[in-house]
Amino acid sequence: MTPERKAQIIARLEAILEGFQPTEEEPEPTMFWLISQYNEQYDNPELIGGDWVAENCPEHLARLP
């Protein structure tokens, strides 16, 4: 993965997290929610998942439950 693609993915994950709106079913963002939202909105040819986020993203993304 190129550094540019990595930065693009992280920016998209950041935007998804910033847009989080709590609901009864999802009172706080989780890693599962974040990756699900990413997959709904964007192509994911690299098949990023929670492990990728934990290893490559800033702490506020990486430590989502």
Image: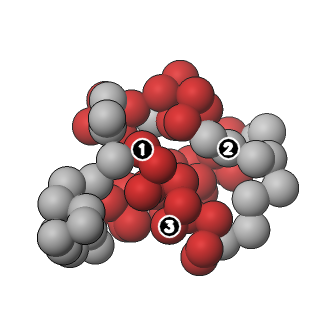
Name the quadrant containing residue 28: bottom left
Residue positioned 25% across, 63% down in the render: 26
Q: Can residue 56 be seen in this view?
A: no
- The 10 Å Cα crowd at callout 1, few under 14, some 14 to 19, many 20 or more, is some
On the image, the x and y values in percent for residue 12 come to 49, 62
**Coloring applied to the structure:** secondary structure
> Would you say the residues marked 1 and 2 are in contact, meaning their CB atoms lie under 8 Å apart?
no
57 to the left or right of 59: right
Q: In this view, does 12 lie to the left or right of 19?
A: right
Seen at 58% across and 28% down, the residue is 51
In the image, is 36 to the left or to the right of 61?
right
Q: Residue 36 at x, y = what percent?
A: 54, 61
Helix, strand or loop under label 1: helix
In the orientation shown, which residue stands out farthest toward the right? 45
Label 1 sits on residue: 31
Query: As displayed, is residue 2 above or below residue 14?
Result: above
